[in-house]
Amino acid sequence: MESTAAVTFESFGLRSEVLEALKSLGYEEPTPIQRETIPALKDGRDVLGQAATGTGKTAAFALPILERIAVKDRRPFEAQALVLVPTRELAMQVAEALQKYGAGVGVVAVPVYGGQEIFQQIKPLKRGADVVIATPGRALDHIARKSLLLKNVKMVVLDEADEMLDMGFEEDLQSILNELPSERQTALFSATLAPRIAKIAERHLKDPVRVTIAAKSVAAGTLPNIRQSAYVVKRGQKEAALMRVLEWETPSSAIIFCRTRKEVEELTHVLMKAGYEPAALHGGLTQEQRDAVLRKFKDGRLRVLVATDVAARGLHVENLSHVINFDLPTSPEVYVHRIGRTGRAGKDGVALSFIDPREQRLLGNVERLLKKKVALAQVPTRAQLDEKRVETVAEQVRVVAETPRAQAFGALVAKVGLPVEQVAAAAMMLLQDKLFPAHEGDDITAAPQREEKGRRRDDRERQAPR
């Protein structure tokens, strides 16, 4: 029996042009999910794959797609393969990977997504696209316009299906799958196989090969320099709780993660009103806008970045002090990937999470992967913040009072015509109000207790970016 270590890309019987491309890209050995998925898809079987981000899923389905593409059959608006993804950023990444792997074959892969004028996408589709990579909403837009025809689709892939469902795309996915030819090959990949995923698989996959790549355990002590805490607060109070925690923590630089583009934009607006001067990073930005935001953040010109996971992929910042999960991810592996951006090179880092009481099961999943409990913290009270504000203002005044320039303001104090103590009190008040603008949400109900058997209700905003 051949050992898994002996499996190579050559052993899959892939096209020579594809093998040459893989060699030039430095691919030496298939990952576990590639070893199990590529042969099944190449044999025409449907596949139901459970694997986290970063396991090599893209090549696992992209290489078999290239085997099924016949460039000579390219027709305007007619795709031979369709890949559905949750975000613009992932659509671009998958398209780029397919172009690289299939360069020698001459395959044309076209990404279509919301945030870009639909007419800009119709032109490349009219020229002919062998593979279309689409967000579900934009795929439906093109299907309705007949600028995307599905009658000749040989293979459809649902990548990160759990994320698409979390973003509210379930009905869109069902509509698209119902439009596809019955004689097609289907692959579904998801970090988790929740009941909703299983239902889609049961309805649309035929006798699928099950591929499960177990998440690597995180050894105890792997994240020794990261202080992890979670705040259990009601969803409607999360923004106010975040403001208090930011003031208490005073991060030198922070990434705040949200699940959707809409939430990123809304939270960025809230932070901006509070005087934090944040920037948003999500799939709706142009590449030029994204690059500009990343440059400012890496250069230290931005202190707070609000981002989605996919938009922040590949983002590595030196000396990142805080990673904040405004929304806890559904996958514990994603949580570990997020917080791993801080506490690097032996430096201390902080990872903070805000969870609704009904989402504590997600925290339990994280703890099982980490093999340790995440401390539940209390949102700072108004009294605690007031005390800290007084200390901060007093320290700043002490520092400035010792400078020569401060002595020149003695004449201004005398001109006010009031006792020095009264003038000083008024000045301190003005300074404190400038440093700490009033925030809404004084009454925050925190619940630092564990609810082991709480029922989760999905009350998330269902309108997702197209």
Image (tube, rainbow, N blue to C red):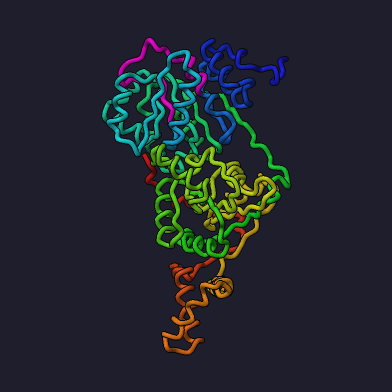
In the shown orientation, is residue 6 left or right of residue 465?
right
* Residue 74 in magenta stretch: yes
Establish if 280 lies above or below 189: below
One can see residue 315 in this view:
yes
Of the pair 442 and 347, the residue shown nearer to us: 347
Where's residue 323, x and y in %? Answer: 57, 51
In the shown orientation, is residue 117 left or right of residue 336?
left
Establish if 180 lies above or below 403: above
Examine the image and state in which quarter residue 19 appears. top right
Establish if 32 lies above or below 336: above
Of the pair 274 and 368, the residue shown nearer to us: 274
Quadrant for the C terminus in the image:
top left
One can see residue 388 in this view:
no
Task: Name which residue lies at 47% across and 17% down.
Answer: 103
Of the pair 126 and 172, the residue shown nearer to us: 126
In the shown orientation, is residue 89 left or right of residue 116?
right
Total residue callouts: 0
Where's residue 416, x and y in %? Answer: 42, 85
In the shown orientation, is residue 145 left or right of residue 435?
left
Task: Name which residue lies at 54% across and 24% down.
Answer: 59
Quadrant for the N terminus in the image:
top right
Task: Name which residue lies at 47% across and 24% down.
Answer: 186
* Residue 162 in magenta stretch: no
Q: Which residues are magenta?
A: 62-84
Where's residue 453, x and y in %? Answer: 59, 54
Task: Name which residue lies at 37% across and 29% down.
Answer: 178
Where's residue 180, x and y in %? Answer: 37, 24
Examine the image and state in which quarter residue 71 appears. top left
